[in-house]
Image: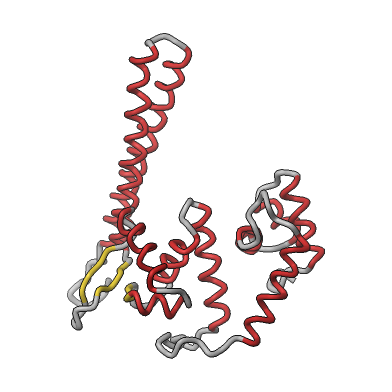
Amino acid sequence: MPGGRLTQQERQQIALGLADGLAYAEIARGLDRPTSTITREVMRNGGPTAYRADLAHRATEHRAHRRRRAAPRDPNTPPQAHGRDAEAVREYEETFATVFMQSGLPKMTARVLAGLYTADTGSLTASELAGRLQVSPASVSKAITFLESQGLIRRERDERRRERYVVDDDVMYQSTMASARATAHLGEVARQGVGILGPGTPAAARLENIARFIDFVSESIARAADQAREILHTKPETTSDGVT
């Protein structure tokens, strides 16, 4: 069943698909599974080049056994709100972190970011993150430093003067704009090579095409981010009778 745990036979099919160079989505369709399930399975068991079906199956059984025998979570960890299934939330956070890992974030950094995004408050302290993820405060601190440098989070002080790490809609906008600027810089560097390698040469022509492509992409990203921010952050007008 699509919602059940992967079987050993399914893991063997995943391994065969990876060996054939199939995309996660294609493997997922063949197994009638969500793409996120295949992505998470592969990324948590060595990645596409090191995935082994038998090792992955044993590791999953070991994790399930360890969870059944696990000690109670840190008392500082807040209970699940709104009647949520704690196990389903944990699995979703793991899936979300896997997506961030695919985009290039280190594992702990991805887990911290996923934890912040799935917190109702959109902000957590270092101790809250450490308790939520069951990791050391030092690991959280290192991840936070990287995320802040990339514009993915921001810091603020709460009423108790504690430092909190925050994600919100505007942080995503700032991160997208930073990505657009970084992409544009790559285009600038590519264009510098045109003069160095000599206009009219094959290498220079290649770099010019790269620069033109990147110019278009970076400008499109920035324009789309501005438009999305304006639309999503604009509150609907309310008439005198209270109708929006």
* Closer-to-camera residue (11/133): 133
- Coloring scheme used: secondary structure
In the picture, measured across the screen, residue 135 lies left or right of residue 20, that is: left
* Closer-to-camera residue (176/136): 136
Q: Quadrant of the N terminus?
A: bottom right
- Measured as percent of width and height from the top left, residue 224 is found at 34, 47
Q: Quadrant of residue 44?
A: bottom right
Q: Is residue 125 above or below residue 23?
A: below
Looking at the image, which residue sits at the far right?
9
Q: Is residue 63 above or below residue 175?
A: below
Q: Quadrant of residue 231?
A: bottom left
- Measured as percent of width and height from the top left, residue 61 is found at 72, 75
In the picture, measured across the screen, residue 207 lies left or right of residue 195, that is: right
Q: Quadrant of residue 131?
A: bottom left
The structure residue drawn at horizontal position 37% and vertical position 20%, both measured from the top left corner, is 193
- Measured as percent of width and height from the top left, residue 67 is found at 62, 82
The structure residue drawn at horizontal position 52% and vertical position 58%, both measured from the top left corner, is 99
**Number of marks:** 0
- Measured as percent of width and height from the top left, residue 15 is found at 75, 54
Q: Quadrant of the C terminus?
A: bottom left
The structure residue drawn at horizontal position 46% and vertical position 87%, both measured from the top left corner, is 74
The structure residue drawn at horizontal position 44% and vertical position 86%, both measured from the top left corner, is 81
In the picture, measured across the screen, residue 13 lies left or right of residue 213, that is: right
Q: Is residue 105 above or below residue 61?
A: above
